[in-house]
Every structure is written in C-alpha cells, then in structure tokens.
Image (spheres, coloured by chain):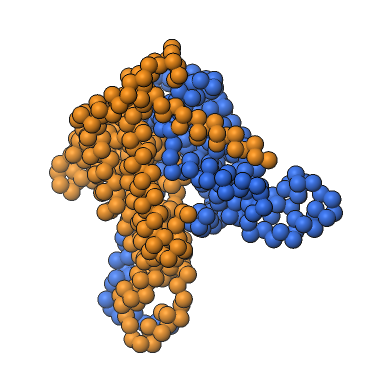
Amino acid sequence: MLKYSKSEKVFEIFLYIILGIIAFTTIYPFIHSFSISLSDRGEALRTGWHFYPKKVDLESYRRVLSSSQIWIGYANTIFRTVVGTFLSILFTIFAAYPLSKKYLPFRSFFISMIFFTMLFGGGMIPTFILIKDIGLYNNRWVYILPGIANAYNTFVMINFLKNIPASLEESARIDGAADIKVLFKIVIPLSTPVIATMALWNGVGHWNSFMDNLLYVTEKDKFVLQEVLRQILIQDRTDSFAALLKTVEKPPAGESLKMATVMVSIIPVIIAYPFLQRYFEKGVLLGSIKG
Amino acid sequence: MLSALVFYIIFCYGPMYGIIIAFKDFNVKAGILGSPWAGFKHFKRLFLDPEFFKIIRNTLLINLYQLLFAFPAPVVFAIMLNEIGSKRYRRFIQTATYLPHFISWVVMAGLLIYFLSPTNGIVNYVLKALTGKTIYFMSKKEYFRSIIVISGIWKEIGWNSIIYMAAIAAIDQSQYEAAICDGANRFQRMWHITIPSILPTVSVLLIMSLGSFLGSNFDQVFNLLNPVLYETGDVFDTYVYRVGLTQFQYSYTTAIGLFRSVVGMILIVIANFLSNKLSNGEVGMW
C-alpha cells in the first residue's frame, strides 16, 4: 500500500476537517429547524445551537397540521407533481420517438423548431398575456401544461431513443404490431432508466416550484405548497395560525410554527431522498451528452 | 404522434408573437392586435432609464461573482473529495451536500433569513462570539450579492460536483500508478494528473455558463430580495415582474425582456461556437 509522508497526512486530515465543515453547514440547518419545530416557546426563542429539542412541545405541529391552507397546498402540489410529471414524460416521448427516426419527413425542421425555443423565448409578460388569453389564469392546469413543452428533456430523450437497435422494432413490425404498440410494448420498456431519471427531475421541479403560482394564480384554494410556504416563511404571515393562537396559555413561538411548516413540507423529499440517490449520478451524466 | 408539438406552438411560439406589444402601447381592453403602435418609444425610454442600467449592472455583477467563486467551488470540492481515503466518509459528505439541491429556494431562503437574523440567528450568534459584533445581513445592501453567491454555493456545491467526480473517476488509474513509481508525491499527482484530466470538462462547463450570463435564478433572488436591497439586488426577472405585473407596464417591460432575450441568444451562440472550437466539435449544444 501507499505510504504517505507527514505533510501528505496533515493535508488529508485538513481535507477531512474542511469537508466536514461543508457537510455540517448543509446538514445543520435542517437539524436546527427540526429542533426548533419541536421546542416549546422559551426554548425556541433561545439564541444559540439547537441540536435536539430540549423541551418538546408538539403544539406547533398540531397547529400547522390543522391549518386548511397547508392541506390545500399539499393537495395542489401532489396533483401537479403526479399528473404533471406523468403528462410531461408522456408527451416528451411522443415528441421524441418520431424525431429519433431519421426517415421522418421534415425532421430537421421540427428539430430546429424545438431547438429554437431553447435559445429564445417570449419573456415573462407576453407569456402572462397568453396565459390570460387562453383561460389558464387561476386554473390549476397552468401548473402542468406550459411545462410539457420542454426542449431540453426532448433532446435527451431523442438521444436515448436513437440508440435503441432498430432491429428490435422491425421484428415487432414484421409480427404485425402497429406503431403505437411498438412504442408502448418495446420502446417505453427499454427506456425505463431515462424515464426514471427524467421523472426525478420533473417531480422535484414540480414539488419545488412556485413562480407559476405567483404569476398566474391568485385564488387561495388553488395555491401550491411552496407559495403557501413562501407567504408564511418569507412574508412572515403566520396569521393563518393566529386564530388558534389564543386557545392555549403558552402558545408556541412564531419560529416554531415556521419551522414546523418547513418540516411538514420537506418530509416527503427527505423520505424519497435515499431512493432517489441511485439515480443522481446517472441523471447528471445523461444531460451532458451532446445532442 | 406530433401532438406534443402543439404545446411548443402554444407555449413557446405563442409568447413570441406577444413580443410585438414591445412596439405598441398595450392595453388589456384592446388586446394585442387592437393596441396602437408605438414604434421604438419603449426602447428609447429603456436606454435613458437609470433603473435599466441598474438591473444590468446588478445582473452582470452577480454573474461575475458567481463565475469567480461559485463556478470553481464544486471543482475544488470534487478534487478534495477525491483525495479522501475513507469511502464511507466520502459517501457521507456526498449525501449531506446533495440534499439541499432537492429543497426549494422558498425553504432555503426562509431558513437563510432566519439564520442570518440579528436577534436570534445562529450566524450572528457565532459572529458575536467571535468578533463581538452583529450584522443586519438582510437589510444592508452591500451584503446582498455575497449572500446570493454564497447561498448558491451552499445549496449546489455537492450537486454540481457530481460531473467533476465522474470526470475524475474516468481517469486511467495506471497513470497514478506510473506516477507513484516515478516517485511523484500526492500534490504532484493532483497537480499533474487530476487537474489536467478534468480541465476539458471544466472549460466546457465554463464556456457554457457564459451563455447564461444575463440570466438569474428568479426563485433564489426573488425570495431573498426585499425593497431595501433593490439598489444592489434587483435583476431582470425581479424588475420585470414587479414593474410589469404589479405596476401594469406591460409594453415597457416586454421591451426589457426582448432586449435580454436577444442579447442572451447571442451569448449562447457565441458560447456554443467557442466550446465547439475548443473541443474540436465534440462538446457543444449543436
């Protein structure tokens, strides 16, 4: 085995410490906010380190979970994540499959047409006017439909489909399978790795986005979770919990309520995280292949 | 099967048609076609507007700082991670640093504002213990750009290092073995093997990042911004959103958006040309 000199060993110890500090700064905020979310008023307002909740009080969770706005946000976010991810992958395949065939008429025209959208866009205001004109304003489908046209994903998918051996499809065709059957029985099952990775990107994107809500939706019953969170966390509006605040003698601190909201919103991501991890590296590398 | 193209026509080309309102005086009642033409009025106003130069300056400065600090950070991080002997420790660091990538900017900004708070934020707690001073980070405009750059590194350093880790993993191990036989020490191996081997990846990603030099992360900037910070923190998206959609100056902000899109497109084309040239056509978007 390798023998390191003294300076090399010191260097390695230094790296362990530096990397440890970096990892600490990314993990600690979540530990801290988890502790605050479970702490009673006095403990939550104490300045300093919070590695674990000292005086446990579940009151903030009780309040957050009894707030109807959180549940509305949750329902809308789950809707857009599930339906949105499904539809955008389905339509990405629909666009990419014919375009992966060299013999498609006008292929290069369609490819350039999709490609151009990566270079140039109408911008925020014309998009806003369009959304209003076609009746998607204050409509839950605004979270889903515009995202279906995703040039980047389409090109990644085209690249992947190009590499499926044509002989597999031909033999199915000889057996009399129609195009649509070839797609669903052969092409899609062979593409599960790319579909899984794309579903991961898409799903996380849907879960975390709020900009379309901010721009196009003003009715509170259609808000997504991130917008509900934004109003509580960034705009400091804890008034949706305020009605309940007077009922106990020692109400939880505002911080606890906020951190409990954070926890409630990120728990699905944290639970999914270990399962998603194996797709990470694949996913990043997938995007770096030339189109 | 080309039903998906309908979505491109509606949601990508539809707004492009709407750009013509940059040359009109748009009002909602008359619609896009019915509004009167205004020629280059909005563009003339734009080039005389000090606000416009302010958002250009802010956008360029934030991107410049990101290029100087946020871009190299994951490269250095990946090299450091590669030098760690213990696989379990490396795995732990990766798991910990990838996590924030999956958390929304709303949450990250919320946590950041809370941690930077002068009254009970942990950052000021540490700062006070070390220097005896507290800093009102979120109400001092001189800190805003640093906060954007550092919080960007904080959230994405692990994730952005994946591609460099892959480049390092692809290095032929026999090179290291040969270097060891020749008596190269650890630092020499890093300097003469690891760094040159990942340099092509680094330079291509660097050039690609130039293509988005007029861009900004709306989710991040918008959630961290407050009116006190407009002077140093307002960028294209946040300004267009505020002035366009909350003050209803549709035509003027469309003109600003068009300016940004055109310059942005030129930058992407240049970036792609350079990266093709540099890699002899192997890496590039087209």
Q: Residue A205, relative to residue B154: is it above or below?
A: above
Question: Could you say which quadrant of the image residue A168 lies in?
Answer: bottom right
Residue drawn 50% across the image and 24% down it:
A131
**How many marks overall?**
0
The answer to whether residue A178 is seen in the rendering is yes
**Closest to the observer: A13 or B1?**
B1
Q: Residue furthest top?
A: B29
> Which image quadrant for residue A122?
top left
Where is residue B91 drawn, in percent x and y?
46, 61
Q: Residue at x 69, y 49 (%)?
A: A188
Q: Is residue A78 visible?
A: no
* Front one among A196 and A98: A98
Residue B255 as seen in the image, left or right of residue A193: left
- Relative height, residue B34 to residue B152 (above, below): above
The image quadrant where one finds the N terminus of chain B is top right
In percent of width and height, residue A222 lies at 52, 22
Residue B185 percent across, percent down from the top left: 32, 80
Residue closer to the observer: B142 or B196: B196
Q: Is residue A93 left or right of residue B59?
A: right
Q: Which chain, by letter, is orange?
A: B
Residue at 74% x, 52% y: name it: A186
- What's the residue at 34%, 51% (across, down)? B210
Residue furthest right as drawn? A175
Decide: is A161 above or below B220: below
**Which chain is depicted blue?**
A
